Structure formats: C-alpha cells, structure tokens
Image (cartoon, rainbow, N blue to C red):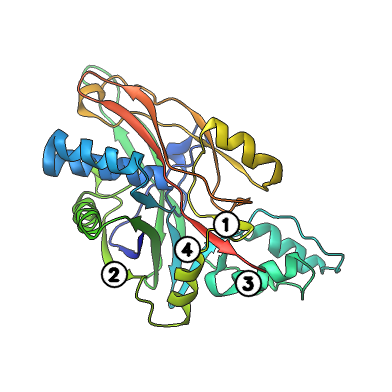
C-alpha cells in the first residue's frame, strides 16, 4: 500500500454540518469525515468521467484499494491527530486545570501521540493545556430562501473560517500508482467545486498546499507516521477514519475496544432528487480516535437508491499502530 498526506489550505469559509444535530445547517464543525470526502469524490468522478469513472472508484474502494482518513487540523508546522478515546490505566493525580483541559481537548499534536499513550499506561502526566489550539473562528451568516408565491424566509448558516496559518490534512492509501494519480486528479477537481455544505454559495473551496509521498519519508514526523501506518500487528490500533466494520468483524472487535459512536446521516446530493430532500440511511459509525485491538476491512454500504445510480457510504479505514 502506498500512503499519501494531503495538506489542504482553504480559500473560503467552510460549512461542515455536525451529523448528530437536527440543526446541522446552523453550526459547522472544523473538519469533515472520510465518508463525506468519498461522497464528494464520487460527485467529482461523475462530473469528470461519467458513470464509468464513478463505478470504477466505487469498485476500488469496496475492494479496499483506496483508504481514506478523516480530515484533521494542521497549524503552522504542527499536524494534529484525534485525541484517542481511551481510559487512563494509571493512579497518577491530575490537577483540576489539567482535567478541564483534557475534557476540552479534541486534537493532539501528532508528535505527542507516544507521550499521550505513555501517560495512559502509567507514565508522566500529559500536559493537555499545551495541546489546546484554536484553528479558526466559528461564525454564521444569514441567507434568504425565496420561493415564488411565498414570503421570503431568512435562515442561518453556520460557517468556519480557518486561520491564515491553519487548514486540514488527510491521509490516503492507494494500492497502485495509477490509483494514486486518479485520486489526485479527483481531489484537484474537488478543490474547485468545494467540499462540505452550501458549496453552491461558494463555501468549501481549497487548494492542495502540499502532497507528501509517505513511503519515502524524509524527516522524523514522516518516518514515524509511515511506520505507524504500516504497523498492523500492534495490539492497539488508533482509528483515523469515521467508519464501521462488517457485522462479523464488529462482533469480534467491540469487546476489546474503546470507542465513541457518531451518527452518519444526510440527504442525497443528486440533481435527480434535489427537490425531494431524500435522506440517506442513517448509521452509527465508530468515531476517529477509537482504539481497537486490530484493524478491519473496508465496506461500501448502500444507503440510498435513485433511478440513475445507487448511493453509497464508504467505510475504508486507516489506522495508526501504537506501541506504548
């Protein structure tokens, strides 16, 4: 497997609606999940290469030849990972300030991952206060929905603006160089249209700040990241992709896992049913940051169907093997 790091810089505000909220339009997260990325890539494939390109993308994903992580923040020279959902196995006392900071913490610097797990298993306390970071600003804007023959209806849209020195990154695994080239073409195409909600209003546009081939690491960070991505034998696997294993694998994994569940829902974004607001099937996925005893395989779930084509939600996870 070839691994790639995509570093994205956003040129506009973004709207990543939280799927757990019925009012997802009114607020915005500061990152998008792997299934959202795959859905956006599917739309791009359909636009660039038609149904044949879309079908090939889905086939490769279902066979596990393309793996995607959730997006994660970067700021300055620091890349962040989701804070692991794992209970400390230590009796060490933590200050009230440290405990409050730990509760607020959603992301940890990638270079801190070993120190975090060392603390979990009895090492020195992890300084959560120093890891807290603000990547941008949450705000909102008022828009007006105009329907012929009806009164104008104002509504709020939640937005997130990244700081000048911040953005998002994600990891991709591709089985072949050709797949990697195709993925780059799709991500570049997606950058012009935008990712997330309300892209028709100009939100979610980005450019690729950097694209790193991790199989040829060149510094400590890329060496450790590539090593952890390859380490499938580690007894603790940090999930980087909001995803869901098959029923058989799920039964085997959950007893020895520490995890959080997140709701994945939404509407079918297709011109064929744009006026119907047809919903996708709702599922509960394991959140990125869950810690599992081993890795699981990709699954492509059918979550809707229209006359033109089926609608899929991808679960193609990437993991970091952790050896505290």
Secondary element under disc 2, as helix, strand or loop, is strand
- Can residue 46 be seen at all in this image of the molecule? yes
Residue at x-position 26% and y-position 57%: 176
Which residue corresponds to mark 2? 209
**In the rendering, at what x and y percent does residue 55 appear?**
22, 35
Q: Could you give the CA–CA distance between mark 2 and mark 3, rounded to whole angstroms?
A: 27 Å
Q: Could you give the CA–CA distance between mark 2 and mark 4, rounded to whole angstroms?
A: 22 Å
- Can residue 277 be seen at all in this image of the molecule? no
Which residue corresponds to mark 4? 229
Nearer to us: label 2 or label 3: 3
Nearer to us: label 4 or label 1: 4
**In the rendering, at what x and y percent does residue 16 appear?**
41, 46
Q: Earlier in the sequence, mark 2 or mark 4?
A: 2
- Residue neighbourhood size for the residue with mark 2, other residues' Cα within 10 Å, grouped as few (<14), some (14–19), many (≥20): few
Q: Earlier in the sequence, mark 1 or mark 2?
A: 2
Picture quadrant of residue 147: top left
Q: Could you give the CA–CA distance between mark 4 and mark 1, rounded to whole angstroms?
A: 10 Å
Q: In the rendered structure, find residue 114 and report the number of the disc placed on it.
A: 3
């Amino acid at each position: 497997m070839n691994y790639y790091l995509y570093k994205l810089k956003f040129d506009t505000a973004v709207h990543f609606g939280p799927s757990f909220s019925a009012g997802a339009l009114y607020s915005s997260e500061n990152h998008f999940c792997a299934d959202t990325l795959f859905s956006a890539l599917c739309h791009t494939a359909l636009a660039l290469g038609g149904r044949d390109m879309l079908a090939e993308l889905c086939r490769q994903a279902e066979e596990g030849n393309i793996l995607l992580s959730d997006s994660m923040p970067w700021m300055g020279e620091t890349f962040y990972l989701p804070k692991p959902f794992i209970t400390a196995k230590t009796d060490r006392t933590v200050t009230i300030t440290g405990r409050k900071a730990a509760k607020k913490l959603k992301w940890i610097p990638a270079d801190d991952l070993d120190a975090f797990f060392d603390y979990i298993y009895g090492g020195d306390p992890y300084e959560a206060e120093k890891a807290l970071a603000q990547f941008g600003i949450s705000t909102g804007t008022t828009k007006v929905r105009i329907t012929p023959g009806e009164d104008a209806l104002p509504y709020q849209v939640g937005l997130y603006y990244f700081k000048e020195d911040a953005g998002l990154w994600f990891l991709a695994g591709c089985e072949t160089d050709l797949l990697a080239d195709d993925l780059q073409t799709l991500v570049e195409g997606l950058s012009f249209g935008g990712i997330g909600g309300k892209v028709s209003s100009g939100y979610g546009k980005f450019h690729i700040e950097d694209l790193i081939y991790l199989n040829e690491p060149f510094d400590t960070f890329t060496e450790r990241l590539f090593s952890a991505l390859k380490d499938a034998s580690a007894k603790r696997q940090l999930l980087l992709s909001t995803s869901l294993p098959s029923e058989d694998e799920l039964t085997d994994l959950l007893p020895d896992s520490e995890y959080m569940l997140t709701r994945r829902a939404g509407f079918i974004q297709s011109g064929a049913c744009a006026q119907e607001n047809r919903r996708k099937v709702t599922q509960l996925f394991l959140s990125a940051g869950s810690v599992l005893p081993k890795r699981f395989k990709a699954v492509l779930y059918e979550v809707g169907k229209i006359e033109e084509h089926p609608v899929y939600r991808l679960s193609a996870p990437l993991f970091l093997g952790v050896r505290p």
